[in-house]
Amino acid sequence: MKRLPRKILAFCGAWIGARYIYRELIFPFLFAISVVTFVLLSNFLFKSVDRLLGKGLQLSVIFEFLYLNLAWIVAMSVPMAVLVAALMAYGRLAEDNEITAMRSSGISFTTILGPGLIFGTLVCLFMIYFHNYVLPEFNHKARLLAGDIYRKRPGLNIEPGYFMDDIPDYSIYVKEREGDQLRKLTIYNKDSQSTQTTIYADSGYLEVDGNTVLFMLFSGEIHELDLENLEDYRKTDFKRHRIAIPVDNLMLERRESARRGDREMTIAMMQENVRKYTRERDKVYAKIFKLVERDLDSTASIDFNKIKALIEQKKTENVRNLAEKTAVSQNKRLNALMSRIKGELNLATSYQKQINKYKVEIHKKFSIPVACIIFILIGAPMGVITKKGGIAVPALLSLLFFLLYYVFLVGGEELADLLIVSPFWAMWTPNILLLIAGIYLTYYATWEHRMLNIEHIKKWFKQKKRNHTFPEES
């Protein structure tokens, strides 16, 4: 019994080589975070450059926009950095035969693995806190700032086929747009209570000069109607017309909003929404049960196909047992009942989708941080097996494993949103699969087995060939 605490202390790093392994892990971890974050941030900046250029934004606003979006990038880069660090650290130790020296001194592989698992656990705990408290706030502020930036320059927000009401007292409709060239414009002036002004133009373009929006219009008409005297109507044709609209709020205005999306909420906020939507869903189910029991005299389950079959059966019985006029009336009532139940079930399904959406995010706040521990279980034995401590092989292996994990994660989220699988299995299945792979790799690294012995397979095929008897030809 006394040996058990010693083994636990040894596993947790209470031996002289543990500090050495911790140092080997920290530098690759920080290096990988820097590289992965830089790559993801550069990609994000490249995709967002069209929303930032031409807005006249201050440099501090651009840096704030990138800083706020840095949170979700870090949330993605940390698990991958843990995997890179484990592969590089243990690969370097194996490449220099330091793992062999430790094991020849009587130190087991599980003890050598201990510092890595402690490191992964510490990162996991930090990321749970980060996902629950830091990331939602950053996501919320980033969304608000992105919306404020988007509204700053109305000219860039014009979408063909939609009315634009970003400019006060004006409503603008554009049928076609080719770059900066606008075609088939309709402009409604809503600033006057006494005169209604409508402008049509074949083409034109929009510019923003300071706090003034300039419209240059070509080949159009101006229609003015006196609302107090409807007989007073004027129409003016023009080949070229310029409109200058002073706007006081073209400078970037910062808004506050209490509304949050699912990725902008803490666990407590999402659990409250889950309880709210569960109550609403249960109310709908109770209403359906009451309708089925009262109008169909049945206790059928919440299954539309079963309820539909029961209604069809009732309709057949009405046709067979009632007078024609009465049967038609009763069957109309049953058809209306089926439509109502179908609508209620669709409403219940919508509530369930909302429940699943929030539950997925709750599980994600734990499953992604826990992946940091699992990546240690994969990276450490893989590094020992490959004996490659450089950056190339660990980076490639990390990318493959992380892409596999991310594909399963996104796929699981889609299946949960479609109510095909539960949120738990959607978010934890990638972890379970990688955990199995990690245990498998750790077992073989512990007992120094080869992953796949080709010679044994060749010998097996040769033995089967010798023992195989072919039938004689007739």
Image: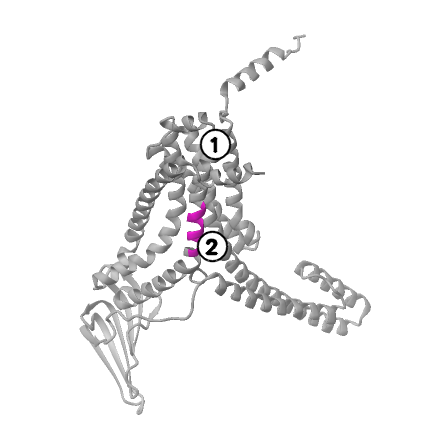
Query: Which element type, helix, strand or loop, lies under badge 2?
Result: helix
Q: Image height check: is 462 above or below 29? A: above
**Residue at coordinates 37% horizontally, 35% vertically from top-left?**
89
In the image, residue 426 sits, relative to residue 394, either above or below, namely below
Query: Which quarter shows the N terminus?
Result: top right
Q: Position of residue 200 (x, y in %)?
A: 27, 73
> What is the x, y in percent for residue 269?
48, 65
Q: Which residues are magenta?
A: 121-129
Residue 330 can be seen in this image: yes
359, 128: nearer the viewer: 128
Q: Is residue 359 magenta?
A: no
Asked which secondary structure carries label 1, the reply is helix
Which secondary structure is most common in the magenta stretch? helix
Q: Residue 313 location, x and y as percent?
A: 75, 62
Q: Which residue is mark 2?
A: 365
* Labelled disc at residue 109: 1
353 w.r.t. 243: above or below: above
Residue drawn 30% across and 57% down?
67
